[in-house]
Amino acid sequence: MLGTDFAHLPAGSPSNGRRQFIKAAGATGVAILALTPEWSFAAGLSADPINIAVIGAGRHARAILDELSKFENAKVTAICDIVPSRLSAALRRVQGATGYADHKDLLAKATDVTVVFVVTPTHTHKEISLDAIAAGKHVFIEAPMAHTIEDCAEIARAARSSSKVVHVGLYARSNPIYKLARTFFRSDSVRDLVTMRAQSNRKNEWRVPVSDPKDDRALNWRLDPQVSIGLPGEFGCHQIDVFNWYLGKYPVSVSGTGSIRLHKDGRKVPDTTHATFLFEDGARLDWSATLANSYEGQYEVLYGTNAAIKLAWTAAWMFKEADAPTQGWEVYANRQRFHNDEGITLIADATKLASQGKLKEGVGLPNPPVYYAIGDFIDAIANAKPAVVSADEGLRATAISILANKAVLDGSRIDISPDSLKV
């Protein structure tokens, strides 16, 4: 079987540092993306500084702070966290930022802030997001959007009534590799969908060590069955949205199972889960996640009658069937072995790069996936564009993952009503 690896995209030659889109010639009309070495949104953004508050100072918030530092016009002026040690650590990373222990205090006093990132535990998103929207801020809400469907719907309603940008952090829709792969999926390259699967495997306790017992509930909320939406919510939400986006439709039912396979420390939240999503046309998505084994990590696969596409967040591949028609671009491809299959690396400007002996240079994403989501958010603010990921789509992905977690905990099959996916 012939495969196509289009994750490794070379640096282009334009000097302005902006992304370049090249349309491939021929009947396929597939968009091929060339990435410059310093992929940046800066050239398309306003030169005026944007004053930002980051609410939450945990591990993921620190990653967001690191990515925000890459945007010249993004200035973090305020950081908030209820855990003093985490707040102090975050403030050491950002010179000149003011610290707050309460988000309401921040919104009242940090009057220069126009943009708020909500990177707190999932069950706290609703109150903070609604307060930030009501205060007239542009708001980036980390996914999953909230821990109940009702809370998601309330946030989505508030977002609809806001004149500001409200963006939900579902990273796939901003990921240049995933956008490129989607053009292939929606072309004749893949043809008719057969089936789908995805997994999120890692060896992780999901328990945060605490020096002060009073901080345990705040830091280990993922293991609190009263508020946690488990692996299907925290991991599955991002992956479920990939299929929502690629297919342009949503599952009609989910069944699941879950158990504790490794971390037998008294927790009630399963460390290993399986869920099956069915779509109205009979298509099926099998999804699994575990904290007990890291083999093959996180990925999504869509199988078609002409090819399969495998997505892995910083890489992606298309494996063509032997009887699939040749479309022309294969002649420029770099070949690579994948076990028993031969992969073709799809590279924009392949002819030019090959003539220079640089075919393998500039491969992969120059930045983590979160960078591109932040870039889309700031770009929407600076250029008065709608959010790339609306609160409505955040509601749908989160609601489906919440129902999946319920199916896992109950060992049941749950119908997904279209009404549950609406504001």
Image: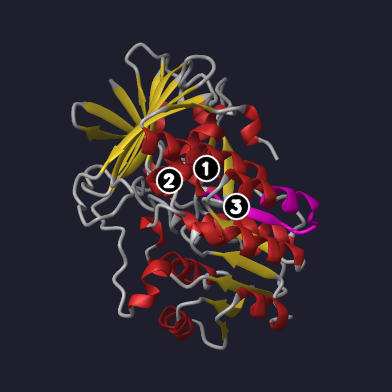
Report the quarter where the C terminus lies.
top right
Left or right side of 365 for 175:
right
Q: Is residue 45 visible?
A: no
Which region is colored magenta?
155-170
- Helix, strand or loop at label 2? It is loop
The part of the image, by quadrant, that contains residue 285 is: top left
Disc 3: which residue: 168
Of residues 301 and 406, the one nearer the viewer is: 406
Mark 1 burial class by Cα count in 10 Å: few <14, some 14-19, many 20+: many
The part of the image, by quadrant, that contains residue 84 is: bottom left
Q: Say which label, 1 or 3, has the lower sequence index.
A: 1
Disc 2: which residue: 9
Q: Which mark is residue 33?
A: 1
Which amino acid does the dot numbered 3 rest on? Val
Left or right side of 365 for 152:
right
The reply to whether dot 1 and dot 2 touch (C-beta < 8 Å) is yes
Of residues 12 and 159, the one nearer the viewer is: 159
Q: Nearer the viewer, mark 2 or mark 3?
A: 3
**As drawn, 371 above or below 322:** below
